[in-house]
Image: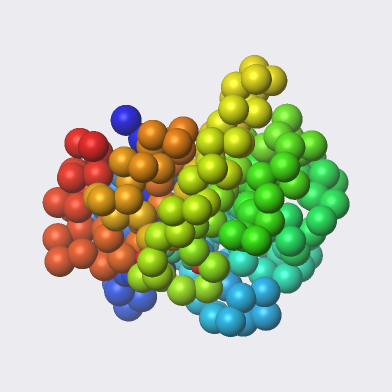
């Protein structure tokens, strides 16, 4: 069974606490928080003050996905706000080692992400410093896009490399994950499924969580 990380990008932003509790209470382990700066991606979502408020409103593991141009500058604010894992893009910081080490020293888990155009091998040198690697299966920026099945070989390549080296890094996939596409991601070796519109955007988010967890 994979870990489910509902993305609150598809939640009701006026009721984020309620929507976060709803999916966590239904059994989701992680909450995926999409941070966009309108520069690294063509959309603006939420920042550290929202994470801080949400931290008071919901228990559970906060997976903060930073889609921002300068993660080294802002990562600390998300740690302070209550992130459990800080996930940033290698395209934004091609030499990520110092930030990965800094995050671990601050006591949070680390995640490194690749956009669709970046090969899996770009992450290989940093796997020992990562608790999780994230494969984007859509171009980052918006929820509700179509799953890119051609990203599955990237999941397989990361899974194989992590296993070959005996590492404990998780593989997460984000974008277009539904009850139909999730089984393909799981079969390719994904441990963590991010789902926005299929969970927080569903008519009954709790039922959607239960359906994913029964896959
Ligand atoms: C996209 C975000 C995703 C998004 C996924 O840039 O990183 O986390 O919320 O949404 P769905 O599941 O609707 O594709
Ligand atoms: Zn995301």
- Residue 151 can be seen in this image: yes
- Residue 88 can be seen in this image: no
Residue 124 in the figure: left or right of residue 158: right
Splitting the image into four quadrants, where does ligand 1 fall?
A: bottom left
Position of residue 44 measured from the top left corner of the image (x, y, whole percent) = 54, 80
Residue 168 in the figure: left or right of residue 175: right
Q: Nearer the viewer, residue 190 or 63?
A: 190
| Image quadrant containing the N terminus | top left
Position of residue 24 measured from the top left corner of the image (x, y, whole percent) = 30, 48
Residue in view at x 73 percent, y 70 percent:
69
**12 relative to 94, above or below:** below
Residue in view at x 32 percent, y 78 percent:
14
Residue in view at x 49 percent, y 46 percent:
152
| Image quadrant containing the C terminus | top left
Q: How is the image coloured?
A: rainbow
Q: Nearer the viewer, residue 210 or 101?
A: 210
Residue 111 in the figure: left or right of residue 59: right
Residue in view at x 14 percent, y 51 percent:
207
For residue 196, which quarter of the picture? bottom left
Position of residue 35 measured from the top left corner of the image (x, y, whole percent) = 55, 67
Residue 120 in the figure: left or right of residue 12: right
**53 relative to 215, above or below:** below
Position of residue 170 measured from the top left corner of the image (x, y, whole percent) = 54, 34
How many badges with numbers are in the image? 0
């Amino acid at each position: 069974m994979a870990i489910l990380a509902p993305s609150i990008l598809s939640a009701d932003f006026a009721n984020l606490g309620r929507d976060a509790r709803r999916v966590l209470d239904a059994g989701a382990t992680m909450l995926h928080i999409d941070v966009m700066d309108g520069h690294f991606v063509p959309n603006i979502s939420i920042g550290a003050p929202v994470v801080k408020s949400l931290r008071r409103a919901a228990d559970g593991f906060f997976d903060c996905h930073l889609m921002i141009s300068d993660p080294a500058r802002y990562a600390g604010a998300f740690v302070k706000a209550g992130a459990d894992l800080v996930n940033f893009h290698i395209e934004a910081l091609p030499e990520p080692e110092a930030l990965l080490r800094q995050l671990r020293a601050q006591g949070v888990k680390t995640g490194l992400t690749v956009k669709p155009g970046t090969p899996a091998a770009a992450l290989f040198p940093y796997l020992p410093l990562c608790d999780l690697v994230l494969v984007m299966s859509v171009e980052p920026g918006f929820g509700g896009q179509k799953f890119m099945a051609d990203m599955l070989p990237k999941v397989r390549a990361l899974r194989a490399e992590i296993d070959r080296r005996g590492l404990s890094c998780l593989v997460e996939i984000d974008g277009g994950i539904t009850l139909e596409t999730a089984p393909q991601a799981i079969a390719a070796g994904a441990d963590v499924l991010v789902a926005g519109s299929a969970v927080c955007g569903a008519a009954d988010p709790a039922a959607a969580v239960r359906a994913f967890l029964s896959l």
